[in-house]
Amino acid sequence: MNLDKNITEIKGIGPSVGGKLSTLGIVTIADLISYYPRRYDDYSNLQKTSSIKPGNAVTIKVTVKQAVGRYVRRGMHITEAVASDDSGSIRLVWFNQPYRANSIKPSHTYFVSGNFELSRGRLAILNPSMELESSFPVNTARIVPIYKETKGLKSTVIRKALSLLISEIKMLPETLPSQVVTDVGLMSRAKAVQTMHFPESMEELAEAKRRLGFEELFGITLASLLNKQQYEQDTGVNIPFNEKTAKKFVSALPYKLTDAQRKTTWQIYGDLHAEKPMNRLVEGDVGSGKTVVAVMSAVMAMEAGFQVTLMAPTEVLARQHATTVHELLSYIGLESEVTLLVGSMKPQQKRTAHARIKNGDARMIIGTHALITERVDLHNLGLVIIDEQHRFGVDQRKKLQAKAGIMPHVLSMTATPIPRTLALTLYGELDISILDELPPGRNPVMTEIVSPNSRKQMYEKIEAELTAGRQAFVVCPLIQESEVLNVISAEKVYEELSKKVFKHRKVALLHGKMKPEAKDSVMEMFVAGEIEILVATTVVEVGVNVPNATIMLIEGAERFGLAQAHQLRGRVGRGSHQGYCYLVMSDSKEPSRRLKALQNNNDGFKLAELDLEIRGPGAIYGKDQSGQLDLRIANLTDAVLISSARNSASMFIHNGLKLNKYPELKIAVQKYRAVTNLN
Ligand code: ADP
Ligand code: MG
């Protein structure tokens, strides 16, 4: 059967079920076959009614009698029945399934599966599934797959549809090279898919998941290796190392570079000088000093006559970068070559910026997405620096590079460390430098989880810090109060703090919906120390540098991802004063594992690993991109399987195998290449 056929062409699936399946994204037979269960209930172990224990999922083989339905109170219907085998009898109860009583055939044998539990003081199997005894039960007496359901479409229907396809599934062709299947010791594809939907044992199921997970990881790593291969064929612009300039810049800095900064810069200089374009990611925890590394790279390119772009995820950050970069470049007299280009600039300013970019007077261009979305005529672009790299989509990066007409060097910087496993799979084509050292004299931020009823003590500590001349951030999950979510908002907190708790202090509000000029002026006042408490949303998340701020209060802390909260915390303790972070919970429940991890851990790498484990790749890699990756089975924390997939992918390339021979793999790899390609 052609797997691209519409599911309604399967005998037994009508237009109504077909319509419902399509709301789950299942249109073709192939879609249905790869619609894997989200979990399994193990009903494979057939028990006697006399031996079943409460609190367990059980399966019995029984005859059923005395099925009666009745309404117990308005709207609530109960069906009760007695099920018997040769060892005894047991009660079955269904809620609000009035059709049950009539559908049970006396003197037939059924498989009945469900949870054996207490209900209103009496034990019963609650809402059991039931089907006539057969050698191929679908909903009972097996490891029963539970699918993601939709309105009016239960797992039972999906199981039935799949049971109609069993012979097609058994004939699914192998998608991986046979050598790989043998070397790695994998189940065949057909067997794996069959097992996902009709597992015979939990062990077999684990093997099936290993096989399908491997296939995904193999596709991803192969894609990233192919990207790397292609990338290495491009010729880049040669930016020679100019020792005099490097020395002059370093000696003009008001501080000594850390060893990590020195090493990373050295690696970058090596890349810039090579034939092929640089493709390097600098990972460094918040405050590790990435900006100066970026500027030292830029200086080399500028000196060689090339243009450099520095893109930041927000205008606030782009403007701040412009100020910092301007100052750093002034050490070697290049400050006049900096220009800012952001969406909110006045038309006249923008025109000037555009002209200076076009004629090459501006060799260091700092901006946001405006650099990509607006018409910008670049002049001899040699280096693209992307700050907080995970914030940019792949397409955006591609567009920027397309503009250059050539393949410029690309330097990405991120404070969200990428766990090793993820780096190996998704970022295999990147060279990575790690700034694993903070500039001297920084104390780790002291972090405390605060339950809502200890606010008073917390405010007292904040008051003391403010009195000592420090400043505070208060970050909230939302701008406005929401009726749906019971979540604290920036506006409400602002009211509370500015009118009551801290009415004698200068409190301001900053959020993403404010006009850019308003945002800037608030930010400027905060930087200048004219605002003492800044109540904000996560617009302050990345990069903002206010060394005098020592307090980061995070409201509704349990709503933030680990990486994000760690970023926020990195906004304080950047100067010589001790930083404090208060993680205020929405309720007085036991703090989550995530919050505790944050409290006890200042290491961004460890937190990223944990985030990956707890919340999956979306937490780190960005929702959109990890969504596009569409990993159904693979676990991105499975280092063993990842490294085996990576070895196989290297062998595939090394042995000169051609993707054309593996059509399904080819499609997957093409998809992954588009997602993982940072170029
Ligand atoms: P991030 O890595 O988070 O982008 P920044 O580049 O903003 O960090 O640097 C944080 C602060 O550390 C800045 O105020 C910067 O001037 C300072 N800094 C950077 N490198 C050093 C160093 N080697 N010694 C002392 N201070 C440094
Ligand atoms: Mg930064």
Image: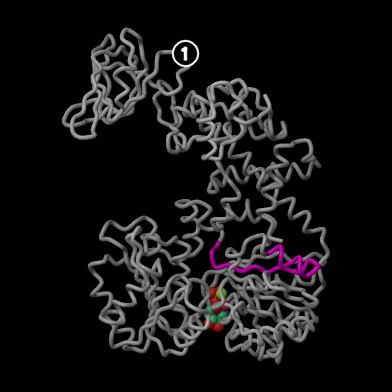
| 60 and 97: which is toward the camera | 97
Picture residue at 59% right of the left edge, 79% below the top: 344
Q: Name the image quarter holding residue 569.
A: bottom left
The residue closer to the viewer here, 322 or 18, is 18
Left or right: 286, with 130 as reference point: right
Q: In the image, what residue occupies the spot 29% across and 83% down?
A: 502
* Up-down relation of residue 453 to residue 527 (above or below): above
Q: Position of residue 360 (x, y in %)?
A: 78, 83
Q: Is residue 559 left or right of residue 539?
A: left
Chain part drawn in magenta: 397-417
Q: Residue furthest top?
A: 107
- Picture quadrant of ligand 1: bottom right
Q: Secondary structure at mark 1?
A: loop
Residue 288 seen from this side: no
- Camera-side residue of 100 and 589: 100
Any magenta on residue 405?
Answer: yes
Say which quarter of the image contains residue 347: bottom right
Q: Amino acid at mark 1?
A: Ser
Measuring 39% from the left and 18% from the top, which residue is drawn there?
Answer: 131
- The structure residue drawn at horizontal position 70% and vertical position 37%, both measured from the top left corner, is 664
Observer-nearest of 124 and 256? 124
Screen quadrant of the C terminus:
bottom right
Which residue is under mark 1? 135
Residue 23 rendering spot, x and y as whole percentages: 52, 40
269 sits to left or right of 642: right
